[in-house]
Image: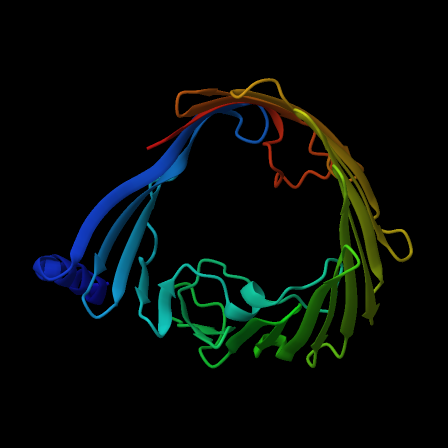
Amino acid sequence: MKKVLLTTSALVAFAGYAAAEVSFGGEVTVGYNDLEESGFYLDGELNITGTAEFDNGVAVEVTYGLDLYDGSFDAFPTVTVTSPWATLTVGTVEYSGTDMFAIVDGMNAGADLREENDELIARVDATFGGISVGVSFDTGLVNQNWSTNDISVGVAGEFGAFSFSAVYDDVNTMFGVQAGTSFGGFDISVAYLASDATGDDSIGIGLGTTFGNVGIAAYYAINNGNADEYGVSADFTAGAASIAVWYEGVEGGAGDDFGVDVEYAYNDNINLGAGYSDVDSFYVFGTMMVGDATIGVSYNDDGDGDMDDDYKAGVDVWMTLPF
C-alpha cells in the first residue's frame, strides 16, 4: 500500500513533465426486490483513477474502487504500467492463460482453468511480431489462493488466414492449443486441453456461420474421462426484434438445456424482453432510458435457485445512474 501511495505522489510530482489527471467514475443502482434482496437495496461502485503519461512512452494508471453495496474498498489498487515493449498489471486482472486461450464450449478436462477470485495477480503482456504472450501469477500478498510458483502462460496470434492460441497453467498442470480459420463462409475452431493432474483431456470443435439475418453456431466436445457435451444455437434479427434459440446437451442427458430469448426495441429508449430455459426457467423484463439513467422492472423465476442470472430472482424494480 505504501508503494502505491508513493507512486501516486510521484505522478503528481512529475505532472510538469507529463500529462497527469485524476478521474472519478462508476454507477449506482437503487431498487426493490422481493426475493433475492428481500426489500430495498443499494448497489454500485465508485472508481478513482489516476493516470500519467511520460515523454519516454511510459504510461501509468492506478485504479482504486469503493463498493457502494457494503462500503468496502478494494483490498489493493490495480496498477497498470504500459510501455512500448510490454504492459505490467498488478491487481484485479485475469490469469493470462485463461484470458488468452480460445476454449471451445463444452470442453472438460476434469479441471477448470483457474480464474481471478479477489487475489492480487501480477501479469506481464508483450507482443512480438504479431504474437501476444502473457505470463501471470498470484503474488500471495492479498487473498492468496495459489502458490506464487504457479504461473499461468497464454499465447495468441495469427498467421495469414489462421489464428491460434495456447495455454499452460501450473495449477492442475493444464496445457492446451487451439487453431481457427474461416472457410466457405464458416468460422471453424478446433482446440485440445489436457490436465496431468486429472489424467483427462478434451477435444473441442466449434462452427459458426451467418445466413442473411440468421447466425448459427454449434459445438461438440469429446471429453475423455468425462461426459461429452454438445450444443447448437441460432440468432435471428428482424428490424427491432431479435430471437435467440439454443440447445445444450450432455452425454447421458444430465444437464441438458433448451432455451429461447426474445427482445424488442420499442424505440430508442424502451426495450422489452422475455426468455425461458429448462435450467433457469422463465424471466421477463422492460427497461427505459431517461437521460443517462436506466429504469427497469423484471421478474425472474430462477428455476435453478442459484441467484446468478442476468436479472435478480423474484420481482425487481431498479434505477441505475452512471456518474
Residue 195 picture quarter: bottom right
Q: Is residue 15 left or right of residue 283?
A: left
User: Quick one: 229 or 30, which is closer to the camera?
Assistant: 229
Q: At which x and y percent is residue 123? A: 42, 70
Q: Is residue 259 left or right of residue 72?
A: right
User: Quick one: 312 or 245, which is closer to the camera?
Assistant: 245
Q: At which x and y percent is residue 47? A: 32, 45
Residue 264 picture quarter: top right
Q: At which x and y percent is residue 218? A: 80, 53
Above or below: residue 213 compared with residue 274: below
Above or below: residue 50 compared with residue 284: below
Identify which residue is drawn at 40% across, 71% down: 140
User: Quick one: 188 or 243, which is closer to the camera?
Assistant: 188
User: Which residue ends up furthest to the right in the rendered image?
Assistant: 252
Q: At which x and y percent is residue 94? A: 49, 62
Which quarter of the rendered picture does the N terminus lie within? bottom left
Identify which residue is drawn at 21% across, 48% down: 22
**Res. 69 visible in picture:** no
**Res. 93 visible in picture:** yes
Residue 235 picture quarter: top right
